[in-house]
Image (cartoon, helix red, strand yellow):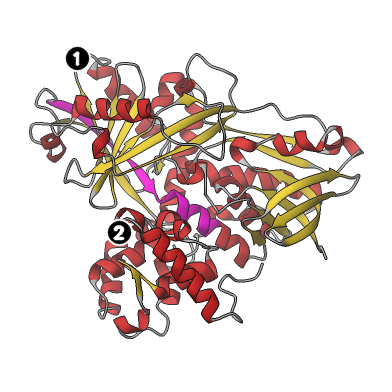
Amino acid sequence: MVDSIDCDVLVVGGGVNGAGIARDAAGRGLRVVLCEKDDLAAHTSSASSKLIHGGLRYLEQYQFALVRKALVERERLLQSAPHISRPLSFIMPHDSGQRPAWLIRAGLLLYDGLARRAFLPASRAVDLRRHPAGAALQARFVRGFEYADGWVDDARLVALAALDARERGATVLTRTTCADVRRHPLHWTAQLHGGARQRQVNARCLVDASGPWAGRLLAAAGAAAGPATPAPRLVKGSHIVVPRLFDHGGGYIFQHPDGRIVFALPYEQAFTLIGTTDVDFAGDLDAVAISPAETLYLCELANRYFRAGVGPADVVWSFAGVRPLAAAPAASAQAASRDFQLVWDGGDGQGAPVLTVVGGKITTFRTLAEQAVDRIAGALGNGHGAWTAQACLPGGDLFGPAPSRRAVLEYDSWAAAMVQRYAFLSPALVRRYGRAYGTRIHRLLEGCRSVADLGPQIVSGLFAVEADYLMRHEWALCGADILWRRTKLGLHVAAGAEALVDAWIATRAADVPSRRLVEPA
């Protein structure tokens, strides 16, 4: 038997754009179904540099509108999700092989002024012989510049957007493939396959937010789906993680002689994240991985700047994602625009509407979703206005329901209060819970009065209470979901931990066969 679901909007794709659109649409009272063939953020949206930024390098390409839009969203995201995001300072070392110092300083002043800064400091020139960030750099770097942007846990951002969508009425289906779509005069039909379960969805509007797969769904549907969407340019970005190369809490931005920009960022206390590359991609989108050449490139770039040398043998983890860029082919992958494009086909009275999302970046996911749903809501006769600019993501309401500067500026004091409140746990564990779940820490630890109440420790740092919470509320179904996307504990545990978590999940399901470990859609 095939279940049938009627909805207003079917969103295909569980990355940041799909989750953001589902969240916005559900908040306006539209009936929403989101389907994702794998886990949430299983691909591009968990493989970013984790930055909330305007894109300093885009000033060189005169993309001022893109930079300004992203800088405005940078402030909003920091305030709406202060638990999974935070301000981050960057050092740009300067040497004689780069642009003149006065030109870089002028660019930073422009970056400062393109959008209002509610709490981030202005850029400044620094003496690296005296600045804490200079100690990790080679002695030849004596001057540089400091500016501020932000950092975010990208995979958790997607999970929280999807969680907000569900709490506002959306149906979110992971591990569910949209196998077929058919266009009719007033609606779409789609066949969804999730394991042994099949569903037919009848939707008034279809949204293709499948990232690098964008356009393939409609192409497979044939002429009845309407005009084809231009194929996006696919660019692979890869990152490496190595043991920590510096002790301070800021990051670095390096400009290689070939013109590429690479970041070195503090990561998970004990590590440094280095990336990204920009390489045109034409391979299997389900098997994206860093190449040996990319690994070597990033190591060599790091060695050009840092005192401590790194090589491929020092890499403890790597990840890669493919970004679908809306721009036409450019001279180089790094020069292609990161702005988004919303391709709307209203049907012209011959068929139900469809929206295809091409491009975009983590920083601007909210405004992309808002613009998308503005178009969808208008076509469907929904008069509810935009709302997400004044809403926190789940767990971000540290000092009230609205985004606020206070939540960013006083996060540490809130975290200290949580450490006191849950004094029966180690401060490090409480701080990690606070960063991952924000105010949802109280739901996570509901009924817990001692360490014993957390249940067994499945692997180091992961107790049953957290694994259970992630399975019930955040669609986690296996060890990789928990250790690498919902948390980053995979970096801190011994080899074989993923299999141990999988075994615990299997045992848990066998022990409580009558209980749904994942909430029903």
Rendered-image quadrant of the N terminus: bottom right
The residue at which mark 2 appears reads as: 493
339 or 277, nearer to the observer: 277
Res 109 visible: no
The residue at which mark 1 appears reads as: 96
Query: Disc 1 on helix, strand or loop?
Result: loop
Q: Nearer the viewer, mark 2 or mark 1?
A: 2
Is 485 left, or right, of 4 in this rendering? left
Whole-percent x and y of residue 163?
56, 62
Is 49 left, or right, of 3 in this rendering? left
Q: How far apart are labels 2 and 1 at the CA level?
A: 43 Å
The part of the chain drawn in magenta is 142-161
Residue 407 painted magenta? no
Q: Amino acid at mark 2?
A: Val
Query: Disc 2 on helix, strand or loop?
Result: loop
- Disc on res. 37: none
Please report the residue visible at 45 percent of the width from the left and 49 percent of the height from the top: 154
Q: Residue 295 appears in which quarter of the rendering? A: top left
Q: Residue 350 appears in which quarter of the rendering? A: top right
Res 425 visible: yes
Residue 150 painted magenta? yes
